[in-house]
Image (spheres, rainbow, N blue to C red):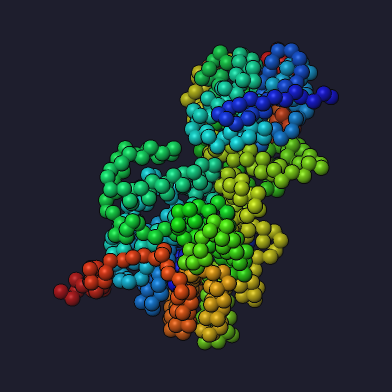
């Protein structure tokens, strides 16, 4: 199986009374809470952590896109991915992803992803989320009633831009371009693997199956809550006659490893409580935009993640304290053996070949994030390498041969001074 | 009291309900935000003197999923123009509230012979940064009724599922109405109607609920200043944004007087 290291890049210094004094971590979070000088340090720490994870041997590093968001400081994950392309050599770069309908024209995504793929020598995983209502409809002002149709059209346009050999005219419902001809072209042929982060809608599952894209369920509520969704996904794959190749799916899981479970509890308590207490504090008025959720999905009773949080808050079932966070499976903690055993169970129960692990979360500092990452790489990772070896991952990047790729110039902090 | 007569017309392959009641010269009404999931007392008050004709806008209750093929403002206006024609309202007096008021004004601007006299209840379509229209969509559910009506119960009466109906479709139809409004007016409510107001030659009555919490009262003055035809402004005490729900008799009487 693949073990992927995911960073949300949360602002780590939201005040303790954030939940009482501020209505929302997203959309209208107040600018006075953002200190660019502190964020300078945060970004650099976060990028160190991603590079460290790559060094430690994780299969991929993952970044994603959010807007006006206090727990996701990457309006453009492509900027981070391009920096990572230059500071890593073998790790897959999973950009999870670009919300297609927000780019005008959407060929911008085809171009930027092609750049990352070329710079990295073919290491890109191209994620195409619709984007949450908070990001797309509220922060970016997109019309919720047209968002999905725009998204699907943009997807088709990007695919054609990557695969067609000649300049073509695109005559879409929402996009018209006389001359589509992107330079550069991606290294990976016919195109980088495409992953779709989604909620639990049947339409998305069917579409992923039809397109042969990976479906990734990025839930903050762990494997216990994810079980129903992943079961639904596999049932639908069975109905469509698709095999149970676990690499069709990805799943997000928070993890904290230490020498013992007690130690893990002590170390990860604060960052976990910071995340579930402060970072998920979204004003319910932004939880949904009319038309964002399709009528079929409404009929099926599926709700989005933030709507889910709103509901949990109303019924007071959202766990914010460590005991409940762990009991509910939001965060898996323990000794390396305990974590390995739990993750093996998660992977096999959910039948997920791509585990996307959040090992920095909340206000966790760089030292602890690196400790978590290192211990995992040394003592957990080796215990999981034999999971799903019987399956082939058809959705993983196919980079250029190592000897054909550029060798990275070693980074010298004081290059000028040395001369 | 007798039930309204109902027929359906086809707009772009989707059915739109047209309800009709009363006698006398025709008077059209285009509903406001949320649409009309049921017949309301305001329409009965109009029907006492006139034949009230109420076409459902695409995507609003009774209007099926007709909004899903309307991608531009021009698409909307052409659909509504056809709807009015098929409802037999060509050249008739036309009233509209909120979303429907904005569309009624557009039709009067672009097809001057389509409308005799116009009555607009807090129409959408403008946006003033210094006095912004309230975001009708980004709201916590329990706060919505009091935003739309001075008496929140009026909104609840409109939107509560009829007893015993127990249809899983009811909430979906109500969400669809919000979506249809969003499709035409997201994100600010601003369709730049200001540019077309000088084309309105029809005498136009502007009606504003004194407690409108959605569209600021200052927008009434901008409508009045922009419209070429004669205008008159009436404010309704004790009414909110959907004044026809809060004060059905007063609003109906004002419209009947204007269109007499």
Q: Is residue B58 visible?
A: yes
Q: Nearer the viewer, residue A60 or A65?
A: A60
Question: Would residue A383 appear left or right of B180 to someone viewing this image?
Answer: left
- Residue at image location 28% in from the left, 43% down from the top: A167
Quarter-of-image position of residue B119: top right
The C terminus of chain A sits in image quarter: bottom left
Coordinates of residue A146 in the picture (x, y in percent): 51, 42
Coordinates of residue B101 in the picture (x, y in percent): 61, 27
Relative to A353, residue A115 above or below: above
Going by the picture, which residue comes out furthest to the front? A241
Relative to A242, residue A402 above or below: below
Going by the picture, which residue comes out furthest to the left? A419
- Residue at image location 26% in from the left, 71% down from the top: A402
- Residue at image location 19% in from the left, 71% down from the top: A416
Relative to B79, residue A388 above or below: below
Q: Is residue A267 visible?
A: no
- Residue at image location 49% in from the left, 56% down from the top: A209
Going by the picture, which residue comes out furthest to the right? B1
Q: Nearer the viewer, residue A374 or B59?
A: B59
Question: Would residue A404 appear left or right of A220 to someone viewing this image?
Answer: left
Coordinates of residue A47 in the picture (x, y in percent): 38, 69
Relative to B230, residue B212 above or below: below
Coordinates of residue A248 in the picture (x, y in percent): 48, 63
Number of dots carrying numbers: 0
Q: Nearer the viewer, residue A184 or B150?
A: A184
């Amino acid at each position: 199986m693949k073990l992927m290291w995911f960073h949300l890049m949360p602002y780590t210094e939201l005040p303790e009374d954030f939940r009482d004094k501020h209505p929302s971590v997203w959309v209208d979070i107040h600018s006075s809470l953002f200190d660019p000088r502190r964020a300078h340090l945060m970004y650099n720490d976060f990028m160190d952590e991603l590079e460290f994870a790559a060094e430690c041997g994780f299969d991929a590093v993952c970044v994603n896109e959010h807007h006006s968001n206090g727990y996701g400081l990457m309006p453009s994950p492509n900027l981070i991915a391009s920096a990572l392309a230059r500071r890593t050599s073998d790790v897959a770069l999973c950009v999870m992803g670009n919300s297609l309908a927000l780019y005008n024209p959407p060929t911008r995504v085809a171009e930027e992803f092609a750049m990352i793929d070329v710079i990295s020598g073919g290491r890109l995983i191209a994620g195409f989320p619709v984007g949450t209502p908070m990001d797309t409809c509220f922060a970016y002002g997109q019309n919720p009633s047209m968002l999905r149709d725009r998204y699907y059209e943009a997807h088709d346009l990007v695919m054609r831009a990557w695969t067609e050999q000649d300049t073509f005219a695109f005559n879409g419902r929402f996009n018209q371009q006389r001359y589509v001809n992107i330079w550069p072209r991606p290294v990976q042929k016919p195109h980088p693997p495409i992953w779709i982060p989604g909620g639990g809608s049947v339409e998305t599952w069917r579409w992923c199956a039809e397109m042969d894209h990976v479906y990734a369920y990025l839930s903050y509520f762990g494997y216990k809550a994810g079980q129903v969704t992943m079961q639904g996904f596999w049932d639908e794959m069975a109905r469509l006659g698709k095999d149970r190749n676990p690499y069709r799916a990805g799943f997000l899981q928070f993890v904290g490893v230490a020498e013992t479970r007690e130690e893990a509890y002590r170390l990860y308590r604060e960052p976990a409580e910071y995340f579930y207490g402060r970072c998920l504090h979204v004003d319910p008025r932004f939880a949904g935009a009319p038309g964002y959720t399709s009528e079929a999905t409404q009929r099926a009773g599926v709700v989005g993640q933030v709507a889910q949080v709103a509901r949990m808050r109303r019924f007071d079932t959202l766990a914010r304290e460590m005991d409940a966070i762990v009991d509910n499976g939001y965060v898996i903690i323990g000794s390396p053996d305990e974590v390995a055993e739990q993750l093996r169970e998660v992977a096999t129960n959910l039948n997920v070949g791509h585990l996307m692990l959040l090992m920095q979360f909340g206000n966790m500092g760089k030292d602890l994030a690196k400790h978590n990452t290192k211990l995992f790489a040394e003592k957990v990772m080796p215990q999981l390498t034999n999971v799903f070896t019987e399956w082939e991952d058809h959705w993983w990047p196919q980079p250029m041969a190592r000897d054909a790729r550029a060798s990275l110039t070693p980074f010298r902090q004081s290059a000028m001074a040395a001369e | 009291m007798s039930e309204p007569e109902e027929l359906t017309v086809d707009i772009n392959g989707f059915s739109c309900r047209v309800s009709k009641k009363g006698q006398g010269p025709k008077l059209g009404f285009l509903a406001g935000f949320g649409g009309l999931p049921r017949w309301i007392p305001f329409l009965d008050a109009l029907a006492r003197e006139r034949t009230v004709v109420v076409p459902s806008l695409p995507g609003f209750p009774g209007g099926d999923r007709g909004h899903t093929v309307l991608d531009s403002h021009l698409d909307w206006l052409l659909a509504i123009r056809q709807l009015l024609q098929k409802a037999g309202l060509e050249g008739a007096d036309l009233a509209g509230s909120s979303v429907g008021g904005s569309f009624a004004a557009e039709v009067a601007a672009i097809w001057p012979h389509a409308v005799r006299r116009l009555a607009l209840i807090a129409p959408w379509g403008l946006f003033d940064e210094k006095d912004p229209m309230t975001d009708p969509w980004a709201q916590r559910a329990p706060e919505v009724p009091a935003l739309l009506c001075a008496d929140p119960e009026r909104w609840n009466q409109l939107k509560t599922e009829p007893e015993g109906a127990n249809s899983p479709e009811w909430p979906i139809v109500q969400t669809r109405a919000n979506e249809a409004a969003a499709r035409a007016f997201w994100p600010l409510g601003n369709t730049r109607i200001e540019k077309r107001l000088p084309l309105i030659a029809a005498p136009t009555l502007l009606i504003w609920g004194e407690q409108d919490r959605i569209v600021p009262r200052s927008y009434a003055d901008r409508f009045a200043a922009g419209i070429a035809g004669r205008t008159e402004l009436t404010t309704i005490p004790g009414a909110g944004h959907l004044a026809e729900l809060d004060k059905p008799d007063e609003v109906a009487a004002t419209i009947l007087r204007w269109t007499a």
